[in-house]
Image (cartoon, rainbow, N blue to C red):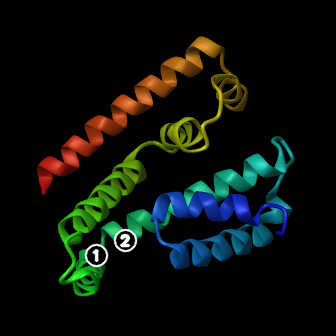
């Protein structure tokens, strides 16, 4: 746990954008991994398997939250109370809206698509590592990154249009 906790926390934080929520979800990930250790077959590296469990847990959490809009409304009220009187209220609201929109859009994408985006745009991994992870060629990895970005763009536009 000590070896992989920072990696899992960063991953959870990238999805949730809240340190406490990331901490809670990190613990949940390690509980799931501990309970599922007997099912780990070793067909991939432990780190890869742990990463997949963490991504799935984060996506499930975002889906759960998207089904409960009252929680989001309460969070916005809290932010408004904190930033009242501040000139950055509108900017803070816009940034939070954008983060939530992206997180929701990512959660609705295919897990492989969101993982590709995470690896390339958040972890800044080179294309050859993405190609290795998905067992594809370098040009195919570049194409998948491009397609994943386009899919995210379409998803964000759809969500923004629905609001």
Front residue of 122/147: it is: 122
Mark 2 burial class by Cα count in 10 Å: few <14, some 14-19, many 20+? some
Residue 103 screen position, x and y as percent = 39, 56
Residue at 52%, 57% (x, y): give it. Answer: 14
Is residue 143 rendered to the left or right of residue 27? left
In terms of image quadrants, where is residue 163?
bottom left
Residue 6 in view here: yes
Residue 59 vs 118, above or below: the answer is below
Q: Marks 2 and 1, how far apart in space?
A: 8 Å
Front residue of 79/66: it is: 79
Q: Secondary structure at mark 2?
A: helix
Residue 62 screen position, x and y as percent = 42, 64
Tally the marks. Answer: 2
Work out whether mark 2 precedes mark 1 in sequence or the reverse, and give the earlier one: 2
Q: Which residue is mark 2?
A: 65
Is residue 70 rendered to the left or right of residue 122? left
Residue 140 screen position, x and y as percent = 57, 16
In terms of image quadrants, where is residue 12?
bottom right
Residue 146 vs 17, above or below: the answer is above
Residue 149 screen position, x and y as percent = 40, 32
Residue at 34%, 50% (x, y): give it. Answer: 105
Q: Which residue is mark 1?
A: 72
Mark 1 burial class by Cα count in 10 Å: few <14, some 14-19, many 20+? some
Q: Secondary structure at mark 1?
A: helix
């Amino acid at each position: 746990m000590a070896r992989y906790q920072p990696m899992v926390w960063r991953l959870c934080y990238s999805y949730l954008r809240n340190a406490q929520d990331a901490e809670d979800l990190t613990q949940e990930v390690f509980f799931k991994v501990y309970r599922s250790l007997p099912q780990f077959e070793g067909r991939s590296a432990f780190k890869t398997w742990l990463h997949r469990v963490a991504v799935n847990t984060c996506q499930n959490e975002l889906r759960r939250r998207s089904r409960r809009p009252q929680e989001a409304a309460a969070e916005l009220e809290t932010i408004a109370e904190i930033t009242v009187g501040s000139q950055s209220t509108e900017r803070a609201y816009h940034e939070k809206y954008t983060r939530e929109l992206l997180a929701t859009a990512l959660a609705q994408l295919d897990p492989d698509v969101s993982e590709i985006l995470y690896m390339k745009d958040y972890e800044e991994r080179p294309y050859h590592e993405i190609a290795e992870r998905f067992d594809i060629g370098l040009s195919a990895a570049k194409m998948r990154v491009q397609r994943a970005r386009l899919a995210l763009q379409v998803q964000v536009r759809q969500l923004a249009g629905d609001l």
